[in-house]
């Protein structure tokens, strides 16, 4: 089983762009690609750094406001994809038992299309938050990973 969603999935497109830029010697395109990569990694670090707060916001006593659903969904989806990648790395791509079940549920939540606002959007958001919590509950990922993500994202650990 592999994590089909996450940072690794975005690499082939960038590789093709880099090859094309190197062939024509386009340093401006290379700079643009590097800038987008840095931005993407920063967004991913922010998502991972805030995953526990986002889970609490979604599964807490009060439902998120309608205008928060899409933003929270995107951020949690990014975090879940990274958590899946981390678990796969820690288990050498061979998760077993409850860990494998959590990974499968997370991947199923990530395969869902991002729905429009409303009840469908809130339901999807809750499924993604539950998937994130389920993966975190497996205690496969080292405790300091989220702290390091917060530091890299510019926050405090």
Image: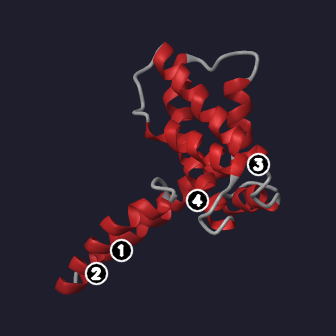
Disc nearer the start of the sequence (1/4): 1
Q: Are marks 2 and 4 in contact (CB under 8 Å)?
A: no
Q: Is residue 32 visible?
A: no
| Label 3 residue SS | loop
Q: CA distance from mark 4 to mark 3?
A: 14 Å
Q: Nearer the viewer, mark 2 or mark 4?
A: 4
Q: Which residue is mark 3?
A: 138
Residue 144, horizontal then vertical, whole percent: 81, 61
Disc nearer the start of the sequence (4/3): 4
Q: Nearer the viewer, mark 3 or mark 1?
A: 3
Q: Nearer the viewer, mark 2 or mark 3?
A: 3
Q: Which residue is mark 2?
A: 27
Mark 4 closeness class: few <14, some 14–19, many ≥20 residues within 10 Å: many
Front-lying residue, 38 or 121: 121
Residue ranking furthest to the left:
24
Q: Are marks 2 and 1 in contact (CB under 8 Å)?
A: yes
Q: Are marks 4 and 3 in contact (CB under 8 Å)?
A: no
Instruction: Name the residue located 49 percent from the left edge and 61 percent from the top edge.
Output: 7
Q: Which residue is mark 1?
A: 31
Q: Is residue 100 left or right of residue 73?
A: right
Q: In this rendering, is residue 44 above or below 93? A: above
Mark 3 closeness class: few <14, some 14–19, many ≥20 residues within 10 Å: some
Instruction: Name the residue located 56 percent from the left edge and 54 percent from the top edge.
Output: 44
Residue 40, horizontal then vertical, whole percent: 48, 58
């Amino acid at each position: 089983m592999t994590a089909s969603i996450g940072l690794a999935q975005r690499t082939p497109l960038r590789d093709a762009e880099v090859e094309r830029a190197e062939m024509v010697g386009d340093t401006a395109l290379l700079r643009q690609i590097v800038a987008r990569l840095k931005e993407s990694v920063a967004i991913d670090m922010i998502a991972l750094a805030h995953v526990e707060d986002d889970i609490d916001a979604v599964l807490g006593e009060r439902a998120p406001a309608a205008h928060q659903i899409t933003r929270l969904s995107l951020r949690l989806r990014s975090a879940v994809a990274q958590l899946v990648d981390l678990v796969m790395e820690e288990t050498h791509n061979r998760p077993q038992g409850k860990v494998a079940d959590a990974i499968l549920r997370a991947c199923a939540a990530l395969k869902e299309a991002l729905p429009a606002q409303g009840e469908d959007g809130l339901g999807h958001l809750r499924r993604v938050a539950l998937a994130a919590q389920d993966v975190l509950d497996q205690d496969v990922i080292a405790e300091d990973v989220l702290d390091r993500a917060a530091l890299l994202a510019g926050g405090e650990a």
